[in-house]
Amino acid sequence: MLDYAATTFITVEDKETFLHLLEEHGGIIHKVAASYSTGLADRHDLRQEITLQLWKAYKRYSPDRPFSTWMYRIALNVAISFLRRNTHPARQTVSLDENEIELVDESAGSAEPDDRILLLQQVIASLGPLDRGLMLLYLDDHSYREIAAVLGISETNVATKLHRLKQRVREEMLRLKRQNP
Protein backbone atom coordinates (compact mmCIF):
# COMPACT_ATOMS: atom_id res chain seq x y z
CA MET A 1 0.00 0.00 0.00
CA LEU A 2 1.38 3.40 -0.92
CA ASP A 3 1.86 5.91 1.91
CA TYR A 4 -0.57 8.85 1.70
CA ALA A 5 2.06 11.36 2.87
CA ALA A 6 4.40 10.24 0.10
CA THR A 7 1.65 10.70 -2.50
CA THR A 8 0.59 14.21 -1.50
CA PHE A 9 2.46 15.96 -4.34
CA ILE A 10 2.05 13.22 -6.95
CA THR A 11 -0.68 13.58 -9.58
CA VAL A 12 -2.78 10.75 -10.94
CA GLU A 13 -0.82 10.97 -14.20
CA ASP A 14 2.45 10.70 -12.25
CA LYS A 15 1.15 7.65 -10.44
CA GLU A 16 0.10 6.00 -13.71
CA THR A 17 3.45 6.84 -15.30
CA PHE A 18 5.29 5.45 -12.28
CA LEU A 19 3.30 2.22 -12.37
CA HIS A 20 3.93 1.87 -16.10
CA LEU A 21 7.68 2.44 -15.67
CA LEU A 22 7.74 0.05 -12.72
CA GLU A 23 6.05 -2.63 -14.81
CA GLU A 24 8.39 -2.00 -17.75
CA HIS A 25 11.56 -2.14 -15.63
CA GLY A 26 10.35 -4.48 -12.87
CA GLY A 27 13.00 -7.06 -13.71
CA ILE A 28 15.55 -4.76 -12.10
CA ILE A 29 13.83 -5.12 -8.73
CA HIS A 30 13.72 -8.90 -9.04
CA LYS A 31 17.39 -9.14 -10.08
CA VAL A 32 18.60 -6.92 -7.26
CA ALA A 33 16.43 -8.69 -4.67
CA ALA A 34 17.61 -12.10 -5.87
CA SER A 35 21.23 -10.97 -5.68
CA TYR A 36 21.02 -9.42 -2.21
CA SER A 37 18.87 -11.90 -0.31
CA THR A 38 19.19 -15.57 0.51
CA GLY A 39 15.70 -16.63 1.50
CA LEU A 40 12.32 -16.31 -0.16
CA ALA A 41 10.88 -14.20 2.67
CA ASP A 42 13.86 -11.81 2.63
CA ARG A 43 13.63 -11.58 -1.16
CA HIS A 44 9.95 -10.65 -0.93
CA ASP A 45 10.63 -8.08 1.82
CA LEU A 46 13.46 -6.55 -0.18
CA ARG A 47 11.32 -6.25 -3.32
CA GLN A 48 8.65 -4.46 -1.27
CA GLU A 49 11.20 -2.13 0.33
CA ILE A 50 12.74 -1.25 -3.05
CA THR A 51 9.31 -0.53 -4.53
CA LEU A 52 8.35 1.66 -1.58
CA GLN A 53 11.59 3.64 -1.73
CA LEU A 54 11.24 4.08 -5.51
CA TRP A 55 7.76 5.47 -4.97
CA LYS A 56 8.92 7.84 -2.23
CA ALA A 57 11.77 9.09 -4.42
CA TYR A 58 9.74 9.31 -7.64
CA LYS A 59 8.88 13.00 -7.22
CA ARG A 60 12.65 13.69 -7.42
CA TYR A 61 13.12 11.62 -10.60
CA SER A 62 14.21 13.72 -13.57
CA PRO A 63 12.81 12.45 -16.90
CA ASP A 64 15.92 13.68 -18.73
CA ARG A 65 17.81 10.74 -17.15
CA PRO A 66 17.18 7.08 -18.00
CA PHE A 67 14.64 5.60 -15.60
CA SER A 68 16.49 2.28 -15.43
CA THR A 69 19.70 3.98 -14.24
CA TRP A 70 17.80 5.91 -11.57
CA MET A 71 15.95 2.74 -10.57
CA TYR A 72 19.14 0.67 -10.30
CA ARG A 73 20.78 3.30 -8.13
CA ILE A 74 17.91 3.36 -5.66
CA ALA A 75 17.43 -0.42 -5.75
CA LEU A 76 21.12 -1.08 -5.05
CA ASN A 77 21.23 1.48 -2.23
CA VAL A 78 18.12 -0.03 -0.64
CA ALA A 79 19.51 -3.56 -1.07
CA ILE A 80 22.82 -2.65 0.55
CA SER A 81 21.02 -0.98 3.47
CA PHE A 82 18.70 -3.98 3.76
CA LEU A 83 21.68 -6.33 3.78
CA ARG A 84 23.42 -4.34 6.51
CA ARG A 85 20.26 -4.18 8.60
CA ASN A 86 19.40 -7.85 8.24
CA THR A 87 22.82 -9.47 8.33
CA HIS A 88 23.64 -11.12 11.59
CA PRO A 89 26.73 -13.30 12.13
CA ALA A 90 24.57 -16.43 12.25
CA ARG A 91 22.84 -15.46 8.97
CA GLN A 92 25.89 -14.79 6.81
CA THR A 93 25.62 -18.08 4.94
CA VAL A 94 24.43 -18.47 1.38
CA SER A 95 21.52 -20.81 0.87
CA LEU A 96 22.26 -23.51 -1.67
CA ASP A 97 18.86 -25.14 -1.31
CA GLU A 98 17.66 -25.92 -4.83
CA ASN A 99 14.25 -24.45 -4.02
CA GLU A 100 15.76 -21.07 -3.22
CA ILE A 101 18.29 -20.73 -6.03
CA GLU A 102 17.01 -18.31 -8.66
CA LEU A 103 18.67 -17.38 -11.88
CA VAL A 104 19.75 -13.76 -12.10
CA ASP A 105 17.50 -13.39 -15.13
CA GLU A 106 14.11 -14.73 -14.08
CA SER A 107 12.66 -14.02 -17.51
CA ALA A 108 14.83 -16.70 -19.13
CA GLY A 109 13.30 -19.94 -20.32
CA SER A 110 12.47 -22.76 -17.96
CA ALA A 111 15.44 -24.91 -18.98
CA GLU A 112 17.52 -26.28 -16.14
CA PRO A 113 20.43 -23.96 -15.34
CA ASP A 114 23.78 -25.46 -16.13
CA ASP A 115 26.44 -25.91 -13.47
CA ARG A 116 28.38 -22.84 -14.58
CA ILE A 117 25.40 -20.56 -13.93
CA LEU A 118 24.82 -22.07 -10.49
CA LEU A 119 28.52 -21.73 -9.73
CA LEU A 120 28.50 -18.11 -10.91
CA GLN A 121 25.48 -17.39 -8.71
CA GLN A 122 27.27 -18.91 -5.74
CA VAL A 123 30.37 -16.78 -6.35
CA ILE A 124 28.33 -13.60 -6.88
CA ALA A 125 26.39 -14.27 -3.67
CA SER A 126 29.70 -14.43 -1.78
CA LEU A 127 30.84 -11.00 -3.02
CA GLY A 128 30.58 -7.87 -0.93
CA PRO A 129 27.53 -5.66 -1.52
CA LEU A 130 29.25 -3.12 -3.78
CA ASP A 131 31.05 -5.75 -5.86
CA ARG A 132 27.79 -7.65 -6.18
CA GLY A 133 26.08 -4.51 -7.51
CA LEU A 134 28.91 -3.89 -9.96
CA MET A 135 28.74 -7.48 -11.23
CA LEU A 136 24.95 -7.36 -11.48
CA LEU A 137 25.08 -4.22 -13.63
CA TYR A 138 27.84 -5.69 -15.79
CA LEU A 139 25.94 -8.95 -16.33
CA ASP A 140 22.87 -6.91 -17.23
CA ASP A 141 24.88 -5.40 -20.14
CA HIS A 142 25.07 -1.85 -18.84
CA SER A 143 27.74 0.40 -20.29
CA TYR A 144 30.59 1.66 -18.12
CA ARG A 145 28.98 5.10 -18.27
CA GLU A 146 25.67 3.74 -16.95
CA ILE A 147 27.41 1.71 -14.24
CA ALA A 148 29.38 4.79 -13.20
CA ALA A 149 26.16 6.81 -12.96
CA VAL A 150 24.43 4.16 -10.84
CA LEU A 151 27.37 3.59 -8.48
CA GLY A 152 28.53 7.20 -8.36
CA ILE A 153 32.10 6.46 -9.46
CA SER A 154 34.12 7.36 -12.56
CA GLU A 155 34.10 5.26 -15.73
CA THR A 156 37.83 4.64 -15.25
CA ASN A 157 37.15 3.34 -11.75
CA VAL A 158 34.39 1.10 -13.14
CA ALA A 159 36.81 -0.35 -15.71
CA THR A 160 39.49 -0.98 -13.10
CA LYS A 161 37.14 -2.47 -10.51
CA LEU A 162 35.39 -4.60 -13.11
CA HIS A 163 38.65 -5.96 -14.51
CA ARG A 164 39.80 -6.99 -11.03
CA LEU A 165 36.39 -8.34 -10.11
CA LYS A 166 36.08 -10.49 -13.24
CA GLN A 167 39.53 -11.94 -12.54
CA ARG A 168 38.59 -12.69 -8.93
CA VAL A 169 35.30 -14.31 -10.00
CA ARG A 170 37.09 -16.45 -12.60
CA GLU A 171 39.64 -17.62 -10.03
CA GLU A 172 36.97 -18.40 -7.45
CA MET A 173 34.89 -20.34 -9.99
CA LEU A 174 37.96 -22.39 -10.96
CA ARG A 175 38.73 -23.05 -7.31
CA LEU A 176 35.18 -24.19 -6.59
CA LYS A 177 35.08 -26.30 -9.73
CA ARG A 178 38.29 -28.09 -8.68
CA GLN A 179 36.82 -28.76 -5.24
CA ASN A 180 33.64 -30.25 -6.71
CA PRO A 181 34.55 -31.87 -10.05
Image (cartoon, rainbow, N blue to C red):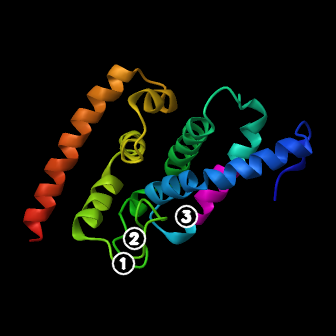
What residue sits 52% from the left and 70% below the top? Answer: 40
Q: Amino acid at mark 2?
A: Ile
* Residue receiving disc 2: 101
Is the residue under label 1 in contact with that under label 3 (CB below 8 Å)?
Answer: no
* Residue receiving disc 1: 98
Cα gap from disc 3 to disc 1, whole angstroms: 16 Å
> Reading the chain from its start, which is encountered first: label 3 or label 1?
3
Crowd rating for badge 1 (residues with CA inside 10 Å; few <14, some 14–19, many 20+): few
Residue stretch rendered in magenta on the structure: 44-51
Cα gap from disc 3 to disc 2, whole angstroms: 13 Å
Q: Nearer the viewer, mark 3 or mark 2?
A: 2
Q: Is residue 131 magenta?
A: no
> Reading the chain from its start, which is encountered first: label 3 or label 2?
3
The quarter of the picture where the C terminus appears is bottom left
Q: Is residue 49 magenta?
A: yes
Crowd rating for badge 2 (residues with CA inside 10 Å; few <14, some 14–19, many 20+): some
Q: Nearer the viewer, mark 3 or mark 1?
A: 1
* Residue 172, horizontal then vertical, whole percent: 17, 52
User: What label sits on residue 42 in the rendered view?
Assistant: 3
* Nearest to the observer: residue 151 or residue 111: 111
What residue sits 42% from the left and 71% below the top? Answer: 109
Dominant secondary structure (helix, strand or loop) of the stretch shown in magenta = helix
Q: Is residue 141 left or right of residue 65?
A: left
Q: Amino acid at mark 1?
A: Glu
Cα gap from disc 2 to disc 1, whole angstroms: 5 Å
Is the residue under label 1 in contact with that under label 2 (CB below 8 Å)?
Answer: yes
Could you say whether the residue bearing mark 1 is in a helix, strand or loop? loop
